Image: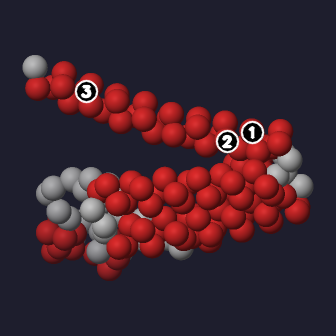
Amino acid sequence: ANAQYGYNNGYNNAMNRSRRSPIPRSPEPERKPENLTAEEIVDREMPKIIDAIDLNEFETAVVSAILTKYVQQSIELQILKLPADKTREAAEKIRENQKEELQAGLPEDKFNKLVELQKQGYKKIKKQKKKKKKKNSDDIE
C-alpha cells in the first residue's frame, strides 16, 4: 500500500529532494510603490487628517479638493526635473498657495490644527533622516 501512494519510494523521495532549493528563501525585497495619483495620495492621508482635526463633511471635501490640487502640482513639478533652485522656488509657491486656500476654506482653529499636523509630519521625517545619518557616521568610525 505504501508503494502505491509513493511512501518510502526511493524515486519519489529523490525527486522531492531535487526540487527543493538548498538555499533558504529570504523574503522578497519590497517593491517600490507604483506611482500614485494625487487623488490616491490624498485619499490615503485624509483619514488621519479627519481624525486629528475632526472635520465635517463639507470641510473634508474642501480640504481634499485643495490638497489634491496642490499634490498634483507637486507631482508635475517633480516630473519637470527643473534645476534645484527653481524647483525649490516653485515648491515654496505651491506651499504658500495651498496654505492660503486652506486658510480661506477652514475655520481658524481647524486651520491651525492642520498646520500643526503638517509640521509634526515634517518633523518625523527630519528626525528619521538625522537618525540614519548618525548611524552611518557611527559605522564609518
Which residue was labeled with disc 2?
Answer: 115
Please tell me which residue is depicted at 14% across the width and 69% down the height of the picture. Answer: 18
**Helix, strand or loop for disc 2:** helix
Circle nearer the viewer, 3 or 1 = 1
Please tell me which residue is depicted at 52% across the width and 69% down the height of the picture. Answer: 73
Q: Residue furthest left?
A: 141
Q: Which amino acid, mark 1?
A: Asn
Q: Earlier in the sequence, mark 2 or mark 3?
A: 2
Please tell me which residue is depicted at 27% across the width and 31% down the height of the picture. Answer: 133
Q: Confirm or deny contact between disc 1 and disc 2 (CB under 8 A).
A: yes
CA gap, disc 3 to disc 1? Answer: 35 Å
Is residue 68 left or right of 89 when viewed as pictured?
right
Q: Quadrant of residue 31?
A: bottom left
Q: Which amino acid, mark 2?
A: Val
Q: Which amino acid, mark 3?
A: Lys
Q: Is residue 134 above or below residue 121?
A: above
CA gap, disc 1 to disc 2? Answer: 5 Å
Q: Earlier in the sequence, mark 3 or mark 1?
A: 1
Which residue was labeled with disc 1?
Answer: 112
Tell me the tag on residue 135: 3
Q: Quadrant of residue 87?
A: bottom left
Q: Nearer the viewer, residue 51 or 92?
A: 92
Is residue 48 left or right of 58 when viewed as pictured?
left
The answer to whether residue 13 shows anywhere in this view is no
Could you tell me residue 136's position as x and y percent? 20, 30
Tell me the quarter of the image containing the N terminus.
Answer: bottom left
Please tell me which residue is depicted at 25% across the width and 56% down the height of the picture. Answer: 25
Could you tell me residue 13's position as x and y percent? 20, 67
